[in-house]
Amino acid sequence: MTILKYLFILMLLLVPTASIADDATAAPPAPAVTWKIATAPLRLRVSVQPRRHPSLFVPVPLELPPDILHVSAVADDGSDIPASPVLVGGRLAGVALYCRGINRQRDDAEAPPTPSISVYLHAEPHEGTTPFLGDSARVVALERSIRPLTTRAHSAAEMLRLFNTPEKKRPVFVVAVPALGAIPDRDTWQQPPDTQRLANAMLRWDARMIVPDERTLAFGADQNHTAWVVLLDGKPVADWSSEAKRPGGGAFGPAITLKPGIYSLQLLAIQRQGEIIPRCLVRPAGEDGPGAAPAGLVPAPQPDFWGIEFADQPERNASALLQLADVGHFLQTDRRVAHYATPTGDTPAQSAPQWLDLNGQAITCSSSNGQLFSAAECIPGFRITTGEQTLTIPAFALWLPGMIHDGRMSFSDLPAVLARHQALPLAIRVTWPESLPPALRENARLLCEQRSADGTVLQSDPLPLTGKDHCRAAITLLAESRSLTIRCTLAGEDLFPALPLRLIHPLDAMLPLVAQGNALYTRQNTRAMMVCDALPPPGDGRLTLRHWPAQPLRLAILDDLIADTNSYAATVLPEQDLAAMLGGPRPLSCSRVNAAPRTGSSPMLAAISALPQLIASRPDFALLSVGAAPLRAGQTPADWCQTLLFLAQACQAAGIDPILVALPELPGLPSGIGRNAALLTKELGLSLGVAVADLYSRQRLNQVDSATWYQHAGLDLPTPHDAARQWLSMTCAHALQRHYPAIFTYHASADDDRQPGQP
């Protein structure tokens, strides 16, 4: 019996599903919306705002015939919608709708909005149309939320920053009121709740103001103690600290000349317990009266879905969908970016809308999936072209609150010195805010701008980022580049403060630098990197000599080897020894700049950070007795010689003759490191045509054990003792006398009867 039951089930499963589907009744397609007003040549199809106030402003294309001045609106369920035309300069600019009673809830919250209202445009009035605009029309949208605040906003910027931090967990109530400053006649709206500690009412009124002709107005409000700010086209024009005081309380901002058009007008207020809600006022320029409520107000919000249909020419129909997803306010740059969803579905590419900014310039969608990012200074407009027809809806300036994000960029690993032929190995770390939506992060762009000495952008290169935390790239520097600027942008707005990198060439080496860790910074806390000039080909070994002046010659020592610090039995100063050992036709002045590593900085950077002090002393010769500290710290001879090249080129650029020092073997280092460093130093001197004091060869020739330099009376010393210092100074003096016989003359001292290399 069980076997038969399973066989029966198997037979049912094998029945072709197509035959079952054929027997079912197919679902009829959605019927087209009937054309309700036969005399209207065209209509607009618009959606309503879900969970928002019922008032809407529907913009009208600029290209419509001038005789279209009348409107009617019908919902898809057949009910009439109160509607009024909005005229500017005698032409139809938009339609004001009151959609109360229309179902504004979507079956699927994630689905894009769909049209549910038809707005008919016609040349003659239509009987039965219910007007919307009037003295008591509720055209202003009011949003109210309650937040605990411990600080008080004292300026317009602080007000906007507080409103730019929406707390999603706290409910936001949205109603329609007739004026900016009006509230519903309910007890719960009069004051913040006294049951909540530090409760403040955050109030925002939004509207559009029609200006029929050119006029000059001052905006303000009537309260002194309640914090408020008035925004015109998204910009503050007055706040409670404005200087022009109003009779009876309140203040006005400076007068502003307005041309005919439509402007956004917003009032933001923060009401504490016991404070009165302000009312927005305007008054003509030159008047000192109390002002009056703004006239000519229409709704600010506009539909997400906008479509146009022609009664006799359906091929001209077009539509656009622009749905706000996120608004981000980036705290450190004070820039705001809006993210819109613009699904096009099956819309042909040639009739897809082209989005416009406030200047009428095109805004490019970031990707093929219909994401649009723009500066959050306006609701983008659009332009649709089908055949010979072009329809344009201009952008509308409006301030929108957003979520505050705080992130930063930083350099990870950068070389301190870069050879001229090398590409810059750029490494950048991006610290993304946790609150940043993925769409904004994934579409951000990283740019590297090379700038000249006067700040002109010479070249801009995109860097690979794609939402990751790190970026690595090789940048080929231009010869004229004097700085780099790393920018993280979206929709042309900087998300984080730009990351500058100062490129210091040998001619600019006088710039004071500060070494911190493994990085160099200017006094303005800008990261810095040295860039060498091109290395000339090896010469014939002859020095490039110049005519020396008659005044006393000056010799400066950049030193981290001979006397980097003082210690027991190590107090002899090499500058005094050299001044005593050398002389000639002209007197000699000798000084020393200590290039020993500083606390908190890398030994690889000590010589570079001390270089500006050496150049500032303006010597005739510079003895570069450096390299011991970086080699002991693990720097390779090749990398150190790159630093030495920059030091020598910087001296030459300042008119100073550099004298390189081939360092002796250093205790604790493998012999190969000292040998390679000495060979590279001498090769560098040959290429530059400069003198080299070869301590390495002299030490090897005299079989001197450098380990004994750091020992005295059974003690280990951190620096060479006095006898070693005297031998090092004597060896350098012999080298100077040999390279510059006409300038330096070695004077043997009374105790100089020992062989060199016997400290």
Image (spheres, rainbow, N blue to C red):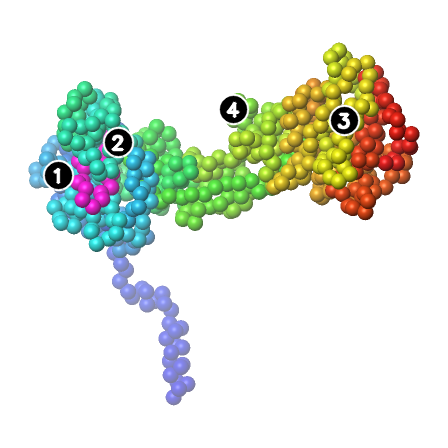
**Badge 3 is on which residue?**
576
- Mark 3 secondary-structure assignment: helix
How would you rate the neighbour count of disc 3 (Cα within 10 Å): few for under 14, some for 14-19, many for 20 or more? Answer: some
Label 4, label 1: how many angstroms apart (C-alpha)? 54 Å
**Badge 4 is on which residue?**
456
Compared with residue 589, is residue 448 higher up or lower down, i.e. above or below?
below
What is the three-letter code of the residue carrying label 4? Answer: Thr
Compared with residue 660, is residue 703 higher up or lower down, i.e. above or below?
below
Which is closer to the viewer, label 2 or label 1?
2
Q: Earlier in the sequence, mark 2 or mark 1?
A: 1
Pick the residue in front: 179 or 83.
Answer: 179
Which is closer to the viewer, label 4 or label 3?
3
What is the three-letter code of the residue carrying label 2? Answer: Ser
What is the three-letter code of the residue carrying label 1? Answer: Ala
State the image coordinates of residue 60 (x, y, percent, origin top left).
23, 33
Farthest left residue in view: 127
**Badge 2 is on which residue?**
241
